[in-house]
Amino acid sequence: MEKKEDGVRFEELHLHPNLLKGIHDLGFLHPTPIQAQAIPLILAGKDLIGCAQTGTGKTAAFVLPILHKLLQGRSGKHVRSLIIAPTRELALQSMDHLKALSRYVHLKGAAIFGGVPMQPQISALAHGVDILSATPGRLLDHIYSGRIDFVDLEVLVLDEADRMLDMGFLPDVRKILHLLPPKRQNLMFSATMPPEILKLTHEILDHPVTVQIGQRSSPAVGIRHAIYPVPRHLKVELLLELLRAEEMTSVLVFARTKRSADRLANELNRRGVKVSVLHGDRSQGQRLQALEQFRRGYAQVMVATDIAARGIDIEDISHVINFEIPNSPDDYIHRIGRTARAEATGDAFTLVDKEEESMVREIEQVLHRSLPRVMLPHFNYKRPGAARPSYPSRGGQHRFQRRPSGPPHRRDRR
C-alpha cells in the first residue's frame, strides 16, 4: 500500500473506523490504484475481477473490504469468507494481511494448507473462524470430514486465479464451488488474466465488473530487463560473476525444477555464497526458515521454483535472475514481479543458452519490446565445459505450453 492513487485517501473509501485506525498505525495514508478502484466496488456488493501486476497491493484490496463487510454483520462459529489460493505461501499471506490490518477488529481467521499436521487446523476450526484462507486439497479434506460449514458464507475469493485454474486445480475448485451457498459475493484477483481464464471466470462470477491496472500480462514498469547469452555449461560461472557485484544484496534465483534448484543451491553454497532454498519438497518449517533467512539478509540468494515462490511477499529484492528460462511468458512476468514491488525499481536478468533464444523471442512478443543482450567484458565465454552438463534442459525441443489441466496429486502441498 506504499504508493498512492493521487487525490485519494483511505478515509474516502468509507471503511470502518477501526480498520482506518489500524491502517494509519501501519503508516499508510493512500491506497494503491488497485485498492482505490476495487474496494468501493466490493463494498457495493459487486462480483469483481481484479487484474494488476504483482506487488501492487491486490491482497489488501480484497482483505480490507471483506473485514469491513464482516464487521457489519454478526460473528459466529461458521466461516463467513473463504479465500482459495494455489500455494501455502499465498494462503499465509492473506492471513498476515488480516492480522496486520485488523489490530482493532475482533474477527478470527485461519490458514488451511497441506504439508503440516492437521490437529492445529482442526482446533482452529472447532473454535470458529470468520475468514478462512486455504489451498484446495487440504480444504476438501476438512470439508469431507465435516469440520467446515459454509451456511453463513458471504464472500468467496479466488487468489491468483490464473494459476489456480491452469495449474490443474480446476477440478478441486469446481468441487468446492458446488459445496458453497449459491448466494454469495465472488472475487477473483490475479496478476495476469489470459482470455481462456476470463471465459471461465464468467461461469463462476455473476455479472462481474473488471478492474484492470496496467496492461494485461505486463510486468511492473520499474523493472530493468537484461538477457545474458551464455553456454549452458558456464551458467553457474556467469551467475557467480554477477553475484559478486556490490548491488547484488538480495537476489532471487529461479530454477525450473526442484532437482535443479537443489543442485544449484548446493553448488553456490560450495562456492561460498549464502543461499536459502524454496521448493515443493521442502517442509513447511524449512520453507518458512528459508524465507526468514532471505528476508533478514542472512542469505544473499534464495533459489526457488515457480510454484514455491508464487505469492512470496519480500520487500527490497534487488534482483531476480532466471537461471533457467521459465515455462511461459506469464511465468516470466510473475518471476520478475518479485522485484520492483509497489512501483519501485529492480533488475531482472535471464541467463540464456543459444537453444533457449526462441523462448526469449516469445517473451519479447508478449512484452512488445526487445530485451537488451548483455555480455560481461572480462568473462571468458569460450572456456571448455564439463563432459556432462550439470543442468540438463529440454533445449530446442522445449516450447511454451499450458500445464496439464487434469487433477493434481495434492498440488497444494508443494
Image: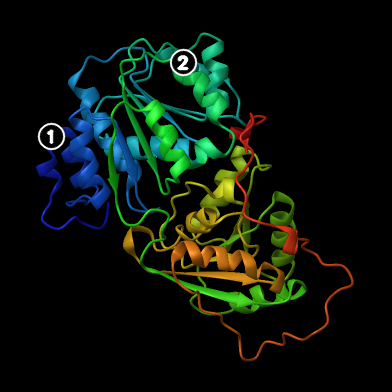
Q: Indicate the quadrant where residue 80 lies.
A: top left
Q: Secondary structure at mark 2?
A: helix
Q: CA distance from mark 1 to mark 2?
A: 36 Å
- Left or right of 65: which side holds 334? right
Q: Nearer the viewer, residue 177 or 114?
A: 177
Query: Furthest-bottom residue in view?
Result: 378
What's the residue type where badge 2 is placed? His
Q: Indicate the quadrant where residue 281 lies.
A: top right
Q: Is residue 272 above or below residue 163?
A: below
Q: Is residue 265 above or below residue 62?
A: below
Few, some or many residues within 10 Å of mark 2 (<14, 14–19, 20+)? few
The numbered mark at residue 178 is 2
Pointers 1 and 2 in contact (CB under 8 A)? no
Q: Secondary structure at mark 1?
A: helix
Q: Earlier in the sequence, mark 1 or mark 2?
A: 1
- Measuring from the top left, give residue 223's x and y in whole percent: 41, 68
Residue ID at (51%, 62%): 297
Few, some or many residues within 10 Å of mark 1 (<14, 14–19, 20+)? few
- Left or right of 134: which side holds 95? left
Q: Which residue is mark 1?
A: 17
Note whether residue 57 is visible: yes
- Left or right of 27: which side holds 172? right
